[in-house]
Amino acid sequence: MRYKSFIFSLFFLLFCLSLEARDANPKSGSMTATELFNKVYNLVFGPQGSALSYKVNIIGLYRTEGNIIYKGKKLHYSEARYMAWEDGITAYMVDKKKKQVNIYRFDDDNKDKYLSKFKYDVKNFDYSYVTEGDFYLVTAKVKNPSLFGIRSVTAKVRKDNLHPVSLTIKLAILHTTVQISNFRSGKIADSNFVFPKEKFKGYEFIDHRNEK
């Protein structure tokens, strides 16, 4: 099983891997957590693609905001310091402060190593959901939490269109919420995932594609 890290792993945990979910409290005659995850999955990771903005602040650990665009195996994100383009074959990871572009195979986990402290195995979660007004609260809870790892992740999605509005992450000693806005599904052009090399003249390019 492949591991992902923090912001990306949270979306993959709740949406991309929904087909592996097992309901902690299935409800007879009602939509199960798995069914709900799969519907949101189709909005976020379906062939039509999707885009969203996010903001997160883990006091003393990590603070950022940015935008993500998905389409199949392709991805583009942009933050104040970091940017990335992944076209399904190659990943270009930009550090604007260091003026570096690190190049990886798109499936190489080392490309996200600056967030590696938040890795986990998605098979180690139970899934459930409750309703809260106009929203569903969909929770993935760790079966066997580590001392410093994630305890649970809860996605808040709108009932009317299943658009995600937040992710709440509970760790051993704190919790934080990733705010999600400007979500849209569909009409994602492939040009979003083409690395614009001409914009990074003067940057150092480091190629990791042949590393084991």
Image (cartoon, rainbow, N blue to C red):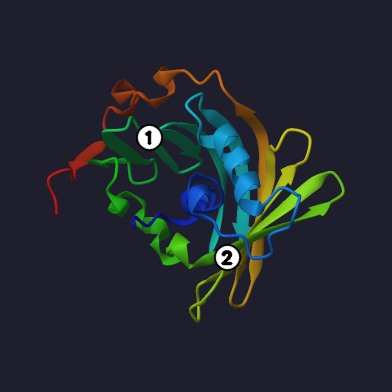
Q: Which residue is mark 1?
A: 73
Query: Is residue 129 placed above or below 48 in the rendered structure?
Result: below
Query: Is residue 4 placed above or below 144 in the rendered structure?
Result: above
The residue positioned farthest toward the right in the image shown: 133
Image quadrant in which you'd find residue 151 = bottom right
Q: Position of residue 211 (x, y in %)?
A: 14, 51
Give the alpha-carbon distance from disc 2 to disc 1, as whole Å: 26 Å
The residue positioned farthest toward the front in the image shown: 29
Query: Is residue 127 placed above or below 41 in the rendered structure?
Result: below
Q: Nearer the viewer, residue 148 or 137?
A: 137
Query: Element type at marker 1?
Result: loop
Query: Element type at marker 2?
Result: strand
In this rendering, would 26 be left or right of 143? Answer: right
Q: Position of residue 94 (x, y in %)?
A: 35, 40
Query: Is residue 25 placed above or below 193 in the rendered structure?
Result: below
Circle number at residue 126? 2
* Amino acid type of the residue tagged 2 in the rendering: Asp
Image quadrant in which you'd find residue 152 = bottom right
User: Which quadrant holds the C terminus?
Assistant: bottom left
| Residue positioned 39% across, 61% down in the render | 116
Q: Nearer the viewer, residue 79 or 109?
A: 109
For the residue carrying disc 1, how many other residues have a C-alpha within 10 Å: few (<14), some (14-19), or many (20+)? some
Which of label 2 and label 1 is nearer to you? 2
For the residue carrying disc 2, how many other residues have a C-alpha within 10 Å: few (<14), some (14-19), or many (20+)? some
